[in-house]
Every structure is written in C-alpha cells, then in structure tokens.
Amino acid sequence: RNSERDRERIRAAQSGFDAIFENVGDGIIVYNGNNTLYRSNRRARTLMGVSSDIEAVDQLRKLVPPFAEMDEDAAVHRIHIRNAAHENMAVQCRVMKMHLQGDCIAYNVLQDISAEERLAAARTAFVMSVNHELSTPLRSLAGSLEILHERFGDTIPKSAGELLTMATRNAERLLVLVNDIQTLQAIDQQQLSIQFERVAVSELLSEAIATNSGYGANRDVRLKMRTAPDAPQDAYIRVDPVRMQQILSNLISNAIKYTPRGGTVKIGADVDQEKVTFYVCDAGPGIPRSAHDRMFKRFADPVHSRDTQAYGTGLGLAITEELVTRQGGDISFETQSVEDGAENPGTTFFVRFARDDTGPLQKASG
C-alpha cells in the first residue's frame, strides 16, 4: 500500500513537472551529451517554427555549435530565425551543461528578444537623428553666442549680459548632452574606437590642464598640478591619448563645477614601480554616503546641484568609467561630505593604469 502511494506521488510530481515544463515562458530543449534528444517544450517548438522535438533540435544544430565543442560554462548565442508565421525573430539561446548522477545533460534555454532588438534599432535611429538635427545647429548657436559675448559683452546692459551668459551656458549644456549620448551609443554598439599608444604621463596632465584652464578661470577656480621630483615626467602608460583626455577632462570639469569660487582643484599622478594613479581633487561639498552607489550609473541624479552652479547630464562619470575600463584601468573615489559631518569636505577621483616603460614614446596629442 505504501509503495502504491509512493508511485502515485511520483506520478503526480511528474505530471506537475510536465505541465510546468510544457507551459513555461522560455523555450527549453534537453538532450544528453551525445546529442541524443530528450525532449523540448511547446515554447521552444513555437520559437523554432517547427512542430516536433526532432525538428526543433535539427533546426537549432544549424545555428549554434555542437555541445561537444562547448566548455563547461554557459554560452550565449544570438540567433535569427523565421517562425511558422514566416516572421523574422531574434532569439537568445543560452547553452548549458550539467552533470546528473554521472551523466552529462545538455540543454538550451530560448528567449524571444525581438522586442529588445526593435527597441535598440529605434534608439539607434533616434540618436542618429539627434546627431543630424541638433548637433550642427547647436554648435553654430554656441559659437554665435560666444562671438556676441566677446564683441559686445562690455557694452550691453547688465541684465542683457546675464541673459547672454545664461543662453551660452544652456547651449553648451545641450552640446555636452548630445556628445555624451553619441559616445554612449558608440560604447553600446561596440563601435568605440580605442587607439593605444605609449604616452608620457606629464604630457597627458599638461594637456588636460591647458584644455580646462579656461573653464576654471570662468568660474574663478584655479587648477594646480602637482610637481614632484620623482616623476611623473619619467612615467609612461599605454592608452588612447584622445580617450585619456576625455577621461581627465570629465573629472576636471566635474571638480571645477563643485569647487567654490576662489577655490583650487588639484591634479596630479602618483607613480610606483607597477602603476600610475592619476588623481583629481576638488574642494566641493563632498559626496554623501547615500549617493556612493549611483555615482557611475547612467543618468544619475546630480549631487548638491541646488547648492552650487553644477549641472550635467548624469552621463559623464558613466562614460568615464567605460573609457577607463576599456583601456585596462580602474577608477574609484574618496570623499568627505558636508552632509555626513566632514570638517574638510571634498572629493578625489583616482584613475589607475599599469606602467609601460618600454618601446617608443608617442606624445599625448589629442
């Protein structure tokens, strides 16, 4: 009697499993390590545009590598198929192995990602439209406002001058947003160009300060580069000098934004036998603990924007982190925040790269 009840429980469990397996939202195909089919579910057959288990496996084998060629770790493939309704579909196929009681079981998990691909295509089209429709007019507008300010800034009424300054700042802000979106698009589509060269640390720092000194002067913030007898004049790293200037300029401009008028932003590099650590130190209010986790996230909310003249797109640090990591470096920060009770508030960002002291030197021209 007990054995009969046990068999009944097993049958009920098997029936429940079959119902779940057959009706789960993802497609699943299971077979052993010898490529012998075990079973597939309804969603898998629908995605593959077939009606039987064997057809599903035959179709999939044409699109992804055989299991015998797989490593133990999961592999993910993006495939394009035509379903039974003759619709083109994008499907993500996760290929995995597992060992069960000494046997190797392989299985595919299939997910329809057509909607995600359509969204990505729409986003690409939107960014291209922004680039075409906004970039050139904005540059023309910003340039015209700058010329107007230079020629007539001392002769127009104070109130008009303030409006002109505000218009110039907003035009520059929109240009930053357009450029940031274009950079993120290149990153997301794996189209970001990285041209590695061996460059001098001192050249990178000098150029970054020269590029941003005018912005600092406009905000009455002084840029001070550390000069130490132990380098960085004799230290080199292998990076893309153009992208490196983008990294340093993002950090320096952020530091200028948050440093009070009359303050100083310190810029430099520490060098040891293995690495170079760039740093940019501001005298701002610091970053509260509540904001630490989101500092490198896209479209992060601004910190202290109500209390300072700082503004931004929420993309600068996200882009900076991407550029650093794609060149083999890492980025971090240390901060003392007014909101957390610090007596000497401020934030220092650190960017680290391995030293490269062999090979011909290329100047860090951008």
Image (cartoon, grey):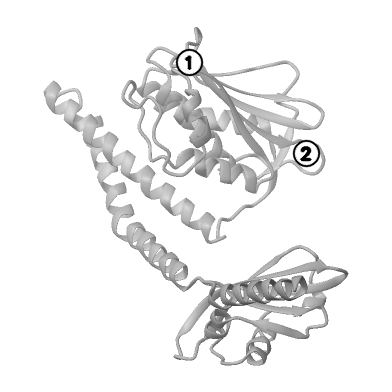
Residue 199, quarter of picture = top right
Residue extending farthest to the front is 1
| SS at badge 2 | loop
Residue 270 in sight? yes
Q: Which residue is mark 2?
A: 356
Task: Kindly indicate whether the residue at mark 1 contacts the one at mark 2 (C-beta within 8 angstroms).
Answer: no
Q: CA distance from mark 2 to mark 1?
A: 40 Å
- Of residues 67 and 106, the one nearer the viewer is 106
Q: Residues within 10 Å of mark 1 (few under 14, many from 20)?
A: some
Q: Residue at x 52, y 57 (%)?
A: 188
Amino acid of disc 1 = Asp
Location of residue 36 in the rendering, given as x and y in whole percent from the top left corner = 78, 85
Residue 174, quarter of picture = top left
Location of residue 19 in the rendering, given as x and y in whole percent from the top left corner = 57, 76
Q: Residue at x 80, y 32 (%)?
A: 274
Quick check: 176 left or right of 56?
left
Rendered view: 10 above or below 35? above
- Of residues 338 and 200, the one nearer the viewer is 338
Residue 146 in sight? no
Amino acid of disc 2 = Asp
Q: Residue at x 73, y 22 (%)?
A: 231
Residue extending farthest to the top is 343
Q: Residue at x 36, y 28 (%)?
A: 310
Q: Which label lies toward us, 2 or 1?
A: 1
Give the position of the N terminus as an image quadrant.
bottom right
Location of residue 242 in the rendering, given as x and y in whole percent from the top left corner = 57, 44
Q: Which residue is mark 1?
A: 340
Residue extending farthest to the right is 102
Location of residue 5 in the rendering, given as x and y in whole percent from the top left corner = 70, 72
Quick check: 340 left or right of 45?
left
